[in-house]
Image (cartoon, grey):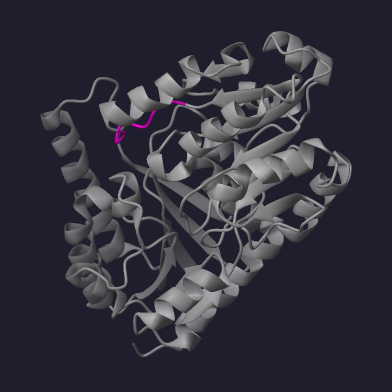
């Protein structure tokens, strides 16, 4: 059977993982719709059963007209592909949120009316709210998303919480499959010696290091972590906070200034190590190897790939109990879950005083590679693809 997966330039780590999980499936042929990329040549995966189509052109210095032209050509190519390719099932990994209305209607016309089956992975329901810094959870779908959802044959979600949300919005239980996020196998997993990593980041070897990693957005709660660090760091003189990630373009100037003010006004500002920039792939192991624990003080999220990156590099995770992010945390093994950011300071104190502890890095790495392997997870995706063929939706 021929199956098409539409990724269209979105996250490379997830696409890489899915392709590595599909490359040994010799019963099916997979067509990957993606974009031109600088970071990795997907053909290097070496899968005879996978064909990659780079329909979306990459523009070095984009203008409105160049972007509009690129997207126009992309949809022309995609339309021709859908009308001529033998794929029976289309797995839509991402919808372009900036033109979601168009894509919801476009895929309905091109796929449903041509009798193709749609498998849609719901990463979250609140992307627009989260990226606009509105920390809330929608209880209803916008009309075009509701329209599109009514024609999807099968849904894939990352945890049971997301499934319950979809069911509460009127989606039939049998149409929703829960398949966890996979381990980050795109990121190089060779750990850096802790002394070398800390020397490079100018952190004393004997320190306790808290890590905040990833694009800085309001819902990720960095302000809460800064408040807690400023509250407890005077009592724990070996405590360092390592912040790595760039300010997201959706952040308001006011919020950026408030974060910088908390850093500058900290009684121990010299122990806040800030790398407020994009962290290149080859640098990532240094940041995690230099850290004792990753802190996720998120205010809300359905799921995140950051914990799986952390696990792959053997770093435990302390997270707020929000959305579905805590589902994959095993307290005392690969992390710890606390209730509400008002308890973050107390949680960090518990960790620093030894009341909260974790297994060694090698066990965390073994666990994530075994339980969240892409071979296992993509096998379940294939089951969903075949199941969608029985749908008369």
Identify which residue is drawn at 57% across, 33% down: 213
Tell me where residue 34 appears, x and y as whole percent: 40, 45
Left or right: residue 147 versus residue 135 is: left
Please give the name of the residue rendered at 66% of the width and 38% of the height, measured from the top-left corner.
294
How many numbered marks are there?
0
Question: Can residue 96 be seen in this snapshot?
Answer: no
Residue 328 placement, left or right of 387 = right
Q: Give the range drawn in magenta.
A: 246-251
* 111 over 301 or under it: above or below: below
Q: Which residue is at 77% across, 43% downward?
A: 350
43 displayed left or right of 134: right
Q: Give percent across and percent down for residue 234.
A: 68, 22
- The answer to which image quadrant residue 66 occupies is top left
Question: If the image is split into quadrants, where does the C terminus sit?
Answer: bottom left
Res. 110 visible in picture: yes
**Percent x, y of residue 354:** 85, 41
In front of the other: 159 or 372: 159
Quadrant for residue 81, please give it. Answer: bottom left
As rendered, which of 30 and 244 lies closer to the eye? 244
Residue 232 on the magenta segment = no
**Nearer to the camera, 105 or 238:** 238
In the image shown, does 341 or 301 lie closer to the viewer?
341
Residue 249 shown in magenta: yes
**Where does the image place residue 300, in percent across and percent down from the top left?**
46, 54
Residue at the image position 53 percent from the left and 30 percent from the top: 226
Q: Determine whether, in the image, residue 24 is placed left or right of residue 303.
A: right
Image vertical order of residue 97 relative to residue 56, above or below: below
**Dominant secondary structure (helix, strand or loop) of the stretch shown in magenta:** loop
């Amino acid at each position: 059977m021929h199956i098409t997966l539409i990724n269209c330039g979105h996250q490379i780590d997830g696409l890489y993982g899915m392709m590595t999980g599909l490359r040994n499936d010799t019963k099916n042929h997979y067509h990957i719709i993606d974009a031109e990329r600088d970071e990795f040549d997907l053909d290097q995966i070496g899968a005879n059963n996978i064909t990659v189509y780079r329909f979306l052109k990459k523009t070095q210095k984009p203008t409105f007209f160049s972007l509009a032209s690129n997207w126009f050509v992309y949809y022309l190519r995609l339309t021709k592909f859908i009308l001529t390719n033998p794929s029976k099932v289309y797995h839509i990994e991402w919808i372009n949120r900036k033109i979601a209305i168009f894509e919801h209607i476009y895929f309905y016309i091109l796929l449903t009316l041509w009798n193709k089956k749609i498998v849609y992975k719901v990463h979250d329901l609140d992307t627009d709210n989260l990226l606009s810094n509105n920390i809330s959870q929608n209880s209803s779908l916008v009309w075009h998303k509701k329209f599109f959802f009514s024609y999807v044959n099968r849904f894939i979600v990352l945890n049971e919480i997301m499934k319950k949300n979809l069911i509460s919005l009127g989606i039939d239980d049998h149409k929703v499959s829960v398949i966890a996020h996979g381990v980050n196998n795109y990121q190089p997993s060779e750990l850096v010696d802790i002394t070398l990593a800390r020397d490079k980041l100018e952190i004393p070897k004997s320190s306790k290091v808290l890590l905040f990693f990833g694009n800085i957005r309001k819902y990720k709660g960095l302000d809460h972590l800064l408040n807690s660090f400023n509250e407890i760091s005077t009592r724990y003189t070996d405590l360092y906070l390592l912040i790595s990630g760039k300010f997201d373009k959706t952040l308001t100037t006011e919020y950026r200034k408030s974060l910088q003010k908390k850093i500058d006004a900290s009684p121990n500002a010299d122990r806040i190590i800030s790398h407020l920039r994009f962290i290149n792939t080859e640098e990532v192991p240094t940041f995690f190897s230099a850290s004792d624990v990753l802190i996720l003080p998120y205010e809300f999220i359905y799921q995140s790939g950051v914990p799986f990156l952390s696990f792959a590099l053997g770093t435990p995770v302390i997270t707020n109990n929000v959305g579905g992010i805590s589902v994959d945390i095993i307290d005392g093994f690969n992390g710890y879950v606390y209730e509400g950011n008002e308890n973050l300071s107390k949680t960090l104190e518990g960790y620093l005083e030894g009341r909260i502890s974790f297994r060694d890095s090698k066990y965390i790495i073994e666990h994530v590679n075994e339980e969240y392997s892409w071979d296992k997870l993509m096998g379940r995706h294939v089951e969903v693809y075949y199941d969608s063929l029985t749908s008369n939706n």
